[in-house]
Image (spheres, rainbow, N blue to C red):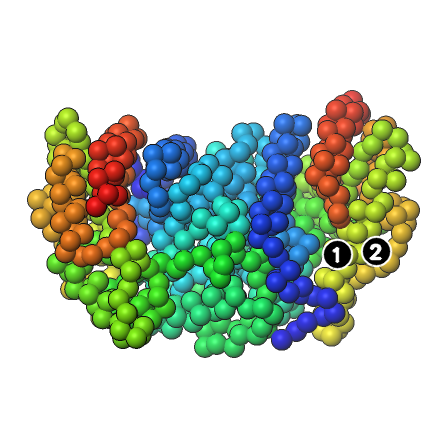
Amino acid sequence: MRRYQDFPAPNKMFDPREGNRLYLEYIEELVLAEELGFDYVALPEQHSKQDNINPSPNILISHLVGKTKRIGLLPYGAILPLHNPIRIAEEYAMLDVLSKGRLLAGFVHGGLTNYLAYGMDYLREREKFEEAWDLIVKAWTADEPFRWSGKHYQFDKVSVWPRPYQKPHPPIYTAGGASASAAAEKGGSFGSGFTTTTEETRGLFGRYRDIYAKKYGRAPPAANLAAARSIYVAETESKAKAESERPLLHQYRVLYRPSMIANERIAKKAKVSLYWASRLFLANEGYDAIVKRGNHIAGSPETVAEMILGQRKDLRFGALLGLFRFGDMTHDQATRSMRLFAEEVMPLLRRAN
Amino acid sequence: MPYKPLEPTAKWPVPRRNYDPVIGSELYREALQAFYRADELGYRILCINEQHSKPSNVTPSPNLLMADLATHTKQAKLLPYGAILPLNNPLRVAEEYAMLDVLSKGRLMAGFIRGGASNHLAYSIPSRETRGRYEEAWELITKAWTAEEPFAWKGKFFKFDTVNVWPRTYQSPYPPIWSSGLTDRSIEWAALKDAGYTRWLSVTAASKLLLDKYRFYYRKYHDGADPQASQLGVARSVYVSKDGDARAECEEHYLHFKDHVNTQIESPYRRIPEGREIYMTGKILGAGKFNHEVAKRGGLHVCGTPEEVLREILAQKKTLGFGVFLANLSYGNMPQTKVIKNLETFAREVMPELQEA
């Protein structure tokens, strides 16, 4: 058995009543996002950990289908090498049909700790990502049952019911450094992570643009690239810092840190260098440093708009994924920040467009 | 949840080019609404199968539908019946069932089944491995739900370094497990594990043999104790009409349903060399074309006035001794208006009497 410092946190810490209460709170926040005019909500897949209890985002996405009407729904994303690609094809097709075409199909490599949770060797298994991608797309689009004899997957007769709602299939979204090249090659969208610094994002986006241009002979649409940041809006700048500093550090030092340590140790043992397996430095930095790296955007509505537009000018992304509730922030605090964002920041962003 | 517009076909797998997702989305919506109504009407259990690659039941992931029902229903238990353990990663089953149990505040019943040929073929799982995978997965999932500390698992089919499933289940020690099966070993296993056991698609006489077999094994493994009636179930298609001609109203839909089952669920057994031996089908089910009369006589299809339906169910209950009756009130190409009428009539005219009995 492999255990790294505080990872994994034993599940006996989980209190089901509290778990139910928190799930319902998070769901309320996601439903609020539709009311506030966000374009989509995203839910990551994470196993065996307390800081994100979502081993099957499709379950919560399906739950959200019934509570929303218009907003895009992004499981972000299915960790392809961990699963049977046929199952992913089936579940995403069901979600697309259930939601009448609101599904955004997330495909990711996923973090080391998730491979550990499923007893898999990251270095060996991540190779499966591209074959799984191709198999899923074929399973979605083939008119006739087909045989698949690949390096990693063999199926006699694939015939996935239902068919997806969107044609030819839901748009594919990827995230994380490992996926940038594959995403560019295959024309999927690509997003950097919450712990990817501005500098690192610039590099990843650059790589994506180069590969895309080489393959398709033109620049990718801006909408293909998304940045992810924690965001906090308050009436004044000083209030924003005062209110978001503690939850932000809680997020990095208490919630993220155990997996960051585990990731580093696994990567070190395997003698690989993966940028996202070297995030621990962020957990050791202070609020101002994290803001300087671009990972946290906080202030008055005007400051927040300015910071976003500044990053957009620099990185030229077409979408911004905001983490509004982080660390030990309460539901009320998070929803207040979301509302301020919708009421005061969104109009400024639209005007700048 | 059948894709109703399609006529049953012997072609396997059924080509998917005829699936229209716009119609498909309406059918899902209607099916979910029928479940919401059932919850309101006081049905105690809502049940959805897992089926792959076929129009007879477009539910490769019943858990996704249960996630919707967890929001929109209040009292009914939710029974995905069942996770086909040889097809799924056992950790994934453990995780999803735990999430559903927490989301629904403890209303999940955990269906575990070994599954049939058509689904094993859909995932290219070798039939000879399904028994071993089934039993090992079952043990692993229940251990994952109850272990106090992370543990390693080194089995024949599954190897995991560090099992530590978040979230934990809401119910303690875990949701009640319900199973099924025709083979001797599946029945023995269910009895050994003290799991609920349900018969569906077996005529009454055959159901008696199988339920008695379950009782036999139960006594063997539980010091001579008998199973509770509450852990024995029977599932039947049901159509009840108070003022109309029940048979005329439902016959077309029943045959549509049975033909789909025959072509897509039962005929694939023929594609596996030892299909009949491995799955025991054909011997008990009497596979072949059923007409309405034969189905009714065999007890598979319970159809008539409220009095007739009640009488038949009570007669089966007397013979078979079950405590749980799963009524399939929406089958084949039955249109939504009839489904709702069927649900409501059964709830008002039959259910109260049944619950007294």
The numbered dot on residue A256 is: 1
Q: CA distance from mark 2 to mark 1?
A: 10 Å
* Image height of B81 relative to B270, above or below: above
Which residue is located at x 75 percent, y 43 percent?
Answer: A329
Q: Is residue B251 above or below residue A13?
A: above
In percent of width and height, residue B35 lies at: 37, 38
A61 to the left or right of B339: right
Residue A135 lies, in percent from the top left, at 49, 55
Residue drawn at x 49%, y 39% is: B71
Chain ID at mark 1? A
Residue A197 image position (x, y, % from top left): 82, 50
- Please tell me which of labels 2 and 1 falls first in the chain: 1
CA neighbours of label 1 inside 10 A, class few (<14), some (14 to 19), many (20+) = many
Give the quarter of the figure containing the N terminus of chain B: top left
Q: Which residue is mark 2?
A: A282
Q: Is residue B246 visible?
A: yes
The one nearer the camera, B65 or A334, is: A334
Q: Amino acid at mark 2?
A: Leu
